[in-house]
Amino acid sequence: MTGILRSAWLLAAFSLGATAIAAQELSPPSPLSPLSPPHAGAPTTWRFVGLPPSKAAIPVTRFEWATHQGERALKVSTASSYGTWVHDLPQVKPTKLQWRWLLDLPLTGGHRVPDLLSKNGDDAALKVCVLFEHALDRVPFVERTVLRLASRVSGEDLPAATVCYVWDSAQAAGLQGANPYSRRVRFISLQGLGSPLGQWQSEARDVAQDFARLFADEWSPGAEPPSVRAVLIGADSDNTGARSVGWVQSVQWRPNGGPEP
């Protein structure tokens, strides 16, 4: 598959179902429903999104509700796989997003070394991403072309900017950059090589500030950041052929001035 088509598939997989909403006054962040329903059969607005049908040969990442260390959480397991767990939103103002995550098994046993900056190694054992309603006229021409192709592939009006918070299996925390397949997706590694395994880690990120920093080449200093249209959780090991096991819990918007998680 050519690079432009692979980029289009990537965007489609990240963004399926996160449809555009007509311009309106932004609302405060909508509550994110629990990752794991309180009991079997309870409804949830989170849903699985994988790769487009033509890539069906790639196994899907498993998302399971389970109890770990006495706490109810979402178990995320990869095995040469790809998948995301998505929560669509109305247009909401970006604020602080908080969550807890734990990695039991980093990406291991694959035929390639994980490398977030390389197409051959672009896998993550855990990631939490925020999808923005970024203005298309700020996107460079070639990338606009890829985005439009991805929209045709998916049948959806896809977001032009995504910020991902990643647990890196190969390098120490602190790496940031653009996804090697598409600059529409940019990342920060919050945990990485050397981070403790089997222990819950708490995060709280000002997603507006992170957007402004990662997309500084497309955004004017001091400008109002774009609205948020979806939050997703993911893990993938399709490029490296590796395996990983992690957990995510308590993904929520943090009220302004509220305590850190």
Image (cartoon, rainbow, N blue to C red):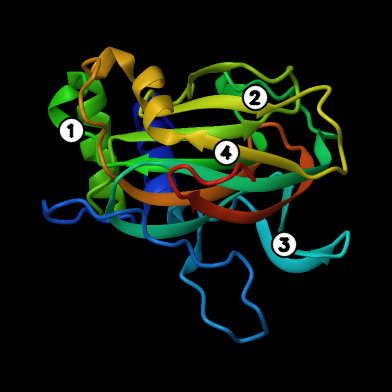
Q: CA distance from mark 2 to mark 4?
A: 27 Å
When the figure is inspected, residue 124 is found, relative to residue 92, above or below; the finding is above
Along the line of sight, the residue nearer the viewer: 74 or 200: 200
Which of discs 1 and 2 lies nearer the camera? The answer is: 1
Tell me the amino acid under the disc marked 4. Ala
Q: Amino acid at mark 3?
A: Ala
Q: Earlier in the sequence, mark 3 or mark 2?
A: 3
Marks 1/2: CA–CA distance: 30 Å
Front disc: 3 or 1:
3
Q: Secondary structure at mark 2?
A: helix
Q: Nearer the viewer, mark 3 or mark 4?
A: 4
Q: Position of residue 183 (x, y in %)?
A: 38, 23
* Residue at image mark 1: 135
Label drawn at residue 204: 4
Snapshot quadrant of residue 73: bottom right
> Could you say whether the residue bearing mark 3 is in a helix, strand or loop?
strand
1 or 4: tag closer to the N-terminus: 1
Q: Amino acid at mark 2?
A: Gly
| Residue type highlighted by circle 1 | Ala
Q: Find residue 73 and name its label.
A: 3
User: Which circle marks residue 100 in the picture?
Assistant: none
Secondary structure beneath disc 4?
strand
22 vs 183, left or right, is left
Left-right relation of 49 to 12: right
Q: CA distance from mark 3 to mark 2?
A: 28 Å
Quadrant including the N terminus: top left
- Is label 3 in contact with label 1 (beta carbons under 8 Å)? no
Q: Which residue is mark 2?
A: 121
**Residue under the image location 63 percent in, 56 percent down:** 250
